[in-house]
Amino acid sequence: MPDQLELLKRLQAIDGELFRLRRAQQEKPVELEQVQAEAAAQEATLKAAEARLTALQLAQKEREVELQTREANVRKLQGQLFQVKTNKEYTAMQHEIDSLKADASLLEEAILKAFDEIDEATTERQQRQAELAQQRERLRAERERIEGELAAINEQMAQLDRSRKTLMPDVPAPTLSAYERVLNIREGLALVPVVDNSCGGCHRRLRPQVINQVYLKADLVTCENCNRILYFDETHSKL
Ligand SMILES: [Zn+2]
């Protein structure tokens, strides 16, 4: 039955390609996952930088309010200083004023130092924002590339399907169903040549009777090990 094998060879060429494309179709989205994960990690880093900046700004605000309160207290006490009756009271109040002024001066130092920290945190937030924007742009470009590749794959698959449909009616139904059964089990490779007296699919050595049957093309001959349909091909075998 030479025609039958020739038809199967043409089908196998199409189906092998279809299986390869189907696998590529499934693997493409995985390529995006890495870029997506990096973008998510950078988003988290930006959030942390923003939280740090907000915390620093809040603490600074508290220090400023605290400083204003102390300065107001100093002014209030200085106003009262002239109303005290005794030296002892005067000294005690002066002491309190000095203490408040010392506190205020420490607060002023802390405020100046925190300004530097806030500047650094602001710069860091800007850097993280820029990095995230870059990563998002990368993600967008990758998505576009992958969508383009997927569209090309779909186009190719549609073409192959059309070629397949024109071939199918010529293949006898039992042959086609035997072929397709093996095709699905063996992930796209159902028809293989005899290669150096072995199966071209699983590489198991074939019995001489099996090789003879393949050579005679009397019927569909399958590998006893992997069930793939065998054919004889001069480029691969010598009898
Ligand atoms: Zn085999």
Image (cartoon, rainbow, N blue to C red):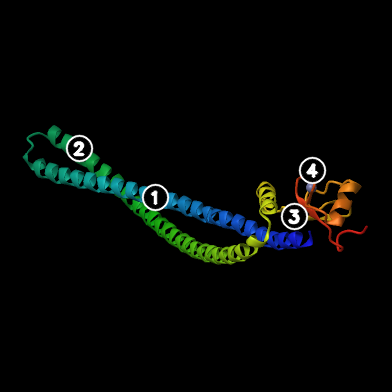
* First along the sequence among labels 3 and 1: 1
Residue at the spot of label 4: 225
Image depth: mark 2 or mark 4 in front: 4
Give the numbered dot on residue 96.
2
Pick the front one: 208 or 171 = 171
**Rendered residue at 9%/33% (across/down):** 86
The tag on residue 18 is none
Disc 3 versus disc 1: nearer the observer: 3
Residue 19 point in image, percent of width and height = 64, 56
Q: What residue type is labelled 3?
A: Leu
Looking at the image, residue 221 sits to the left or right of residue 109; the answer is right
Q: Name the residue under label 3.
A: 191
Mark 1: amino acid:
Lys
Which residue is disc 1 drawn over?
Answer: 47
Q: Earlier in the sequence, mark 4 or mark 3?
A: 3
Sooner in the amino-acid sequence: mark 2 or mark 3: 2
Give the mark nearer the N terminus: 1 vs 4. 1
Report the Cα–Cα distance between label 2 and label 1: 44 Å
Alpha carbon separation for disc pair 1 and 4: 58 Å
**Residue at mark 2 to residue at mark 4: CA–CA distance:** 99 Å
